[in-house]
Image (cartoon, grey):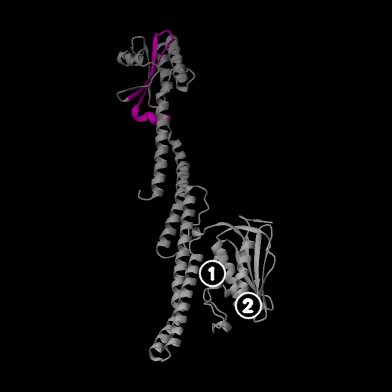
């Protein structure tokens, strides 16, 4: 009885047994209830009383004995007819005590010594009819052994019900056990609509959130250990050169440059962690997309001109989104700066936005060398750089597009890239479920 399944099954069976027992007890006590003469046992007693009286008055003791034997045949019962004083008309035995008990509780079932007694008086009061059933047999008289077969389907139904109630609990227990052992992909996966299904789905949501946070933490540690090794090595060498080089100004500038790179990289890593971590921390609010893009383009023009290129923002429709303005700004800005970084001198970077009934698409295109087709699927991975860009001549740690993708994911959008021949075209598609377009 330690398992919930066994407890539910036994409690259901016990409830049914108690209900059946209570039903038959109350039925037995109510067999001759005075509420109505149409009650089955009341009708039976009245009929037997009339038959016994008729046999006595017409055929005497022999007729009465034959009638009483017929009433009690094969049922291990006793039946007798008495006069108004309680004297047995066949044997002469005095049943006055039994008569007084029946008179004090008329039309009720009596429990006397080892028998259950039912009594009925004739309308003129001249006769009393008594029916006695041994206590050890009365339940079998009411409830036949053949009726026990009904317990089989009842037990089966109780078993199926208990299994139905406990199956999601066992499934949830298995998922919790696997999750506790380090399998963060374990889920209950219940599709039930009741409280147990809600509990399983709540666990799945919790597990999904923990898995996301753990994956972000592990990825951050791996990325830090991988990417910080090189700048730390260069910083260490720059310090050694500063100690031995007479031109300390140049050496210190080198140290400062490497320190700035480390500081910038750590800032980007924190942005990645925030972007992919807890979705509940997003501070949503109305964001005018046209104003946001115009502001970004104004800053981007200066950076593009510094690299000998130009940036053009085509007219943007008035679109208001329900979004985290900082995350959305960071996503678009990183895509734009990535395009500026790879734009050849004298070329142009094009930005535009198009709105439909359900989505708005922001596209940024440069006219640079593009990306090898086999690398298109990885350019949004943290620290990934195309082989031709590994000299870092164009700068960057390979985190900008990763930050953009995760920020877009948190807004339930998509970020895609394809070669435009020439150049690379990056598209940000955001849903307009919480926004309006005009």
Q: Secondary structure at mark 1?
A: helix
Q: Nearer the viewer, mark 1 or mark 2?
A: 2
Q: Quadrant of residue 137?
A: top left
Q: Is residue 119 magenta?
A: yes
At horizontal 44% and vertical 40% (from top left) the residue drawn is 151
Residue 284, x across and y down, in percent: 54, 57
Q: Nearer the viewer, residue 58 or 148?
A: 148
Q: Which mark is residue 403?
A: 1
Give the mark, 1 or 2, whose residue is nearer the N terminus: 2
Query: From what the image shows, is residue 380 above or below residue 212?
Result: below
Residue 189, x across and y down, in percent: 50, 57
Left of 388 or right of it: where is 88?
Answer: left
- In this figure, what is the number of numbered marks? 2
Classify mark 1: residues with Cα within 10 Å, few (<14), some (14-19) or many (20+). Answer: many
Q: Is residue 420 visible?
A: yes
At horizontal 58% and vertical 84% (from top left) the residue drawn is 388
At horizontal 57% and vertical 71% (from top left) the residue drawn is 334
Residue identified by numbered label 2: 305
At horizontal 45% and vertical 62% (from top left) the residue drawn is 210
Residue 89, x across and y down, in percent: 36, 12
Q: Secondary structure at mark 2?
A: helix
Q: Quadrant of residue 123?
A: top left
What's drawn in magenta, residue-wise? Answer: 115-142
Residue 61, x across and y down, in percent: 39, 13
Q: Is residue 284 magenta?
A: no
Give the distance between the C-alpha atoms of the residues marked 1 and 2, in whole angstroms: 25 Å
């Amino acid at each position: 009885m330690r398992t919930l399944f066994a407890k539910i099954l036994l409690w259901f069976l016990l409830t049914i047994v108690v209900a059946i027992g209570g039903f038959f007890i109350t039925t037995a006590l109510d067999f001759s209830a005075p509420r109505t003469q149409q009650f089955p046992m009341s009708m039976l007693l009245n009929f037997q009383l009339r038959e016994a009286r008729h046999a006595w008055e017409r055929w005497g003791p022999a007729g009465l004995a034959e009638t009483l034997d017929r009433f009690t045949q094969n049922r291990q019962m006793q039946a007798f007819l008495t006069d108004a004083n309680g004297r047995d008309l066949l044997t002469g035995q005095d049943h006055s005590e039994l008569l007084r008990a029946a008179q004090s509780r008329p039309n009720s079932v009596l429990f006397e010594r080892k028998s259950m007694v039912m009594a009925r008086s004739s309308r003129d009061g001249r006769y009393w009819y008594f029916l006695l059933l041994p206590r050890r047999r009365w339940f079998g008289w009411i409830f036949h052994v053949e009726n026990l077969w009904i317990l089989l389907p009842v037990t089966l139904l109780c078993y199926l019900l208990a299994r139905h109630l406990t199956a999601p609990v066992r499934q949830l227990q298995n998922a919790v056990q696997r999750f506790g052992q380090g399998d963060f992909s374990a889920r209950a996966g219940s599709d039930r609509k009741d409280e147990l299904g809600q509990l399983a789905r709540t666990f799945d949501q919790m597990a999904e959130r923990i898995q996301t946070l753990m994956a972000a933490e592990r990825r951050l540690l791996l990325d830090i250990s991988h990417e910080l090794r090189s700048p730390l090595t260069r910083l260490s060498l720059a310090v050694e050169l500063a100690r031995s080089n007479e031109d300390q100004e140049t050496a210190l500038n080198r140290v400062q440059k490497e320190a700035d790179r480390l500081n910038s990289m750590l800032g980007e890593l924190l942005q990645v962690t925030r972007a992919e971590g807890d979705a509940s921390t997003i501070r949503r609010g109305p964001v005018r997309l046209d104003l946001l893009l115009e502001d970004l383009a104004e800053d981007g023009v200066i950076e593009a001109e510094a690299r000998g290129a130009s940036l053009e923002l085509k007219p943007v429709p008035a679109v208001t989104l329900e979004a985290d303005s900082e995350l959305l700004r960071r996503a678009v800005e990183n895509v734009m700066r990535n395009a500026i970084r790879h734009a050849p001198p004298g070329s142009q970077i094009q930005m535009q936005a198009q709105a439909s009934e359900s989505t708005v698409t922001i596209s940024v295109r440069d006219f640079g060398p593009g990306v090898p087709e086999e690398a298109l699927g990885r350019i949004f991975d943290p620290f990934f750089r195309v082989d031709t860009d590994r000299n870092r001549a164009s700068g960057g740690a390979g985190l900008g597009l990763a930050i953009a993708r995760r920020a877009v994911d948190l807004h339930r959008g998509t970020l895609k890239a394809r070669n435009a021949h020439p150049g690379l075209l990056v598209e940000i598609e955001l849903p307009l479920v919480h926004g309006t377009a005009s």
